[in-house]
Image: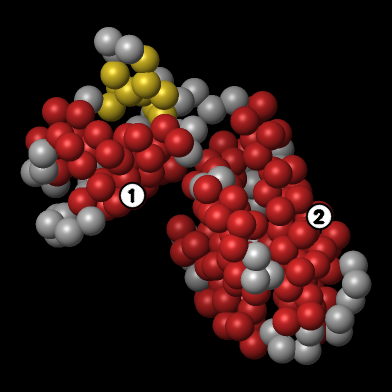
């Protein structure tokens, strides 16, 4: 097994697969802030050419996970408290707007949210965050606003939330109850559901 602990890659969509391998390395701590990411070494470990590694690094730079310096290559960014203070209000604002837009569509019809809550309740480890984000994504998609969804996805929601939870040792056990409360607010057509979701997202903030 290579240093990235990556599964064997298939030949299609290599850039996306390498991107995910590197994201997993960053969020798990296997790739530490300040650590160099050498294209040749990554390509060798994964058994691919350097081109898809370069493409993956460009995507990670757009997500603010790596930084590239001329003549020095790419390094994992040194994440700061300011990064997280900037991220969560933006995420919370987008999701508050999404909830307000989605409210008419989800009013009394929250079965799609309840599916994610059931999966979240039964989840453990990394799956907790994955199912939590799926719950939030369901609301964003229900808003029916393609621009909002695109901006939300571009933030790297799961990645940055995972980084924050890991860095600040955020307690996740009580978050499922908040998801249940949010679904209940949609069910009963509570006009404050947007603010409720906003405050829930901000509860992850440091």
Residue 10 visible: yes
Q: Nearer the viewer, residue 6 or 88?
A: 88
Q: Which mark is residue 20?
A: 1
- Along the line of sight, the residue nearer the viewer: 110 or 26: 110
Q: In the image, is 7 to the left or to the right of 122?
A: left
Q: Is residue 79 above or below residue 71?
A: below
Determine the secondary structure under disc 2: helix
Residue 33 in view (yes/no): no
Query: Badge 2 is on which residue?
Result: 199
Residue 23, by quadrant, is top left
Residue 63 location (% of width, % of height): 48, 39
Task: Give coordinates of residue 118: x percent, y percent.
Answer: 58, 81
Dot 1: element: helix
Depth order, front residue of 43/148: 148
84 sits to left or right of 63: right
Residue at figure coordinates x 71%, y 58% from the top left: 95
Specify the quadrant that holds the C terminus: top right
The reply, left or right, for residue 79 in relation to residue 65 is right
Q: Residue at x 57, y 37 (%)?
A: 167
Q: Residue at x 50, y 70 (%)?
A: 123
Image position of 33 with respect to 143: above or below: above
Furthest-top residue in this view: 71
């Amino acid at each position: 097994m290579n240093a990235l602990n990556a599964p064997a890659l298939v030949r299609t969509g290599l850039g996306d697969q390498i991107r995910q391998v590197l994201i997993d390395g960053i969020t798990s701590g296997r790739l530490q802030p300040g650590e160099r990411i050498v294209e040749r070494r990554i390509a060798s470990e994964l058994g691919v050419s350097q081109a898809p590694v370069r493409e993956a690094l460009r995507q990670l730079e757009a997500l603010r996970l790596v930084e590239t310096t001329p003549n020095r290559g790419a390094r994992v960014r040194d994440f700061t408290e300011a990064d997280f203070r900037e991220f969560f209000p933006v995420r919370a604002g987008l999701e508050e707007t999404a909830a307000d837009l989605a409210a008419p569509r989800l009013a009394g019809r929250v079965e799609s949210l309840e599916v994610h809550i059931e999966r979240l309740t039964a989840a453990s480890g990394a799956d907790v965050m994955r199912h939590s984000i799926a719950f939030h994504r369901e609301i964003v998609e229900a808003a029916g606003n393609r621009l909002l969804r695109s901006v939300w996805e571009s933030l790297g929601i799961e990645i940055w939330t995972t980084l924050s939870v890991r860095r600040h040792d955020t307690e996740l056990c009580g978050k499922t109850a908040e998801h249940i409360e949010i679904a209940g607010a949609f069910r009963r057509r509570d006009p404050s559901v947007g603010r409720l979701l906003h405050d829930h997202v901000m509860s992850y903030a440091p």
